[in-house]
């Protein structure tokens, strides 16, 4: 079965987590902790673009720390809701394509790309666009799931992301979770290849070792069985971790090249 991977329209209508203010703000707090650690200074002079803003909860939180925040998404309903709910001088929302944002070259200090790559039709094109709009020395906060995960969170189905695509489509239909499997996850090695143009600063291990420092207790409860298991996998089979958080730096010497 061949299935076209177009955009998922009105994603906020099929995923209630996009409306969970507490959950979204937890993610935003981790973003601030990681970016603050990376820059080692105030973020208040930096301009940020969030790709996949959805209902704007994360962007509203981030706007407390950054000079300007622009959240983009193809979800018209979500962006309309964000614009009504969150009104600030330094915060804006825009319906835009992650693969063609229409932002100027080298216009953003920071781009957020959190759990988005698997949803877009062409992740490589999206990262070409991210590279293009980042200023030299700018960074992308990249949170990504690993294809090699035991349970696929979007459908809550074991092994869904691992099995061949034609079986995954049938699996989703057989279980009544949808008409086809839209998301396309990459393995650890696929993710490395996807962002090869950037310098990777990996925060995954630090977050696993010290979740409190990065306000990530919701992901890795300290001293829990999950925490113990994550540390073991990190040490002996890093490529099997279910997800990663990386800072992707656009090197200053690469600023004249936009090929990813």
Image (cartoon, rainbow, N blue to C red):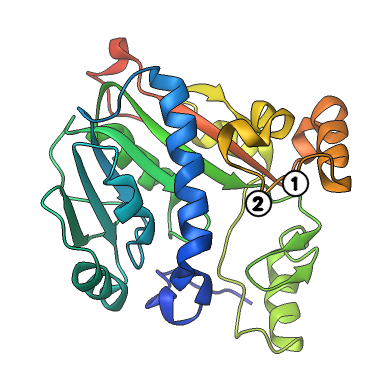
Picture quadrant where residue 35 is located: top left
| Residue labelled with disc 1 | 221
Which quadrant is the N terminus positioned in? bottom right
Provide residue 154's location: percent of width, then percent of height: 62, 69
Quarter of image, res 93: bottom left
Measured as percent of width and height from the top left, residue 123 is found at 45, 49
Q: Which residue is mark 2?
A: 218
SS at circle 1: loop
Residue 103: percent from the left, percent from the top?
Answer: 16, 44
Q: Are marks 2 and 1 in contact (CB under 8 Å)?
A: yes
Residue sitting at x 72%, y 80%: 170
Q: Which residue is at the front of the view, 138 or 91?
A: 91
Residue 177 shows in the view: yes
Q: Nearer the viewer, residue 238 or 60?
A: 60
Residue 26 horizontal side relative to residue 174, left or right: left
Q: Residue at x 26, y 40 (%)?
A: 48
**Would you say 19 lies left or right of 240 here?**
left
* Disc 2 residue crowd, few under 14, some 14–19, many 20+, Cα 10 Å: few
Look at the picture and state if 169 lies above or below 127.
below
């Amino acid at each position: 079965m061949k299935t076209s991977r177009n955009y998922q329209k009105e994603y906020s209508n099929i995923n209630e987590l996009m409306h969970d203010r507490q959950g979204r703000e937890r993610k935003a707090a981790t973003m601030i902790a990681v970016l603050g650690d990376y820059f080692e200074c105030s973020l208040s002079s930096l301009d940020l673009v969030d790709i996949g803003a959805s209902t704007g909860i994360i962007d509203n939180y981030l706007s407390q720390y950054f000079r300007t925040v622009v959240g983009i998404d193809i979800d018209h309903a979500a962006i309309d809701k964000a614009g009504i709910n969150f009104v600030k001088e330094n915060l804006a929302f825009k319906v835009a394509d992650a693969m063609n944002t229409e932002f100027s070259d080298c216009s953003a200090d920071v781009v957020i790309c959190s759990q988005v790559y698997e949803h877009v039709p062409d992740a490589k094109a999206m990262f070409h666009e991210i590279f293009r709009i980042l200023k030299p020395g700018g960074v992308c906060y990249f949170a990504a799931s690993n294809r090699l995960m035991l349970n696929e969170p979007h459908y809550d189905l074991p092994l869904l992301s691992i099995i061949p695509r034609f079986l995954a489509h049938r699996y989703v239909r057989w279980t009544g979770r949808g008409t086809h499997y839209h998301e396309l996850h990459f393995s650890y090695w696929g993710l490395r290849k996807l962002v090869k143009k950037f310098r990777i600063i990996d925060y995954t291990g630090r977050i696993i070792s010290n979740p409190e420092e990065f306000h990530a207790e919701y992901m890795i409860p300290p001293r829990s069985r999950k925490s113990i298991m994550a540390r073991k996998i990190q040490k002996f089979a890093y490529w099997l971790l279910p997800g990663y958080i990386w800072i992707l730096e656009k090197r200053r010497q690469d600023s004249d090249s936009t090929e990813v």
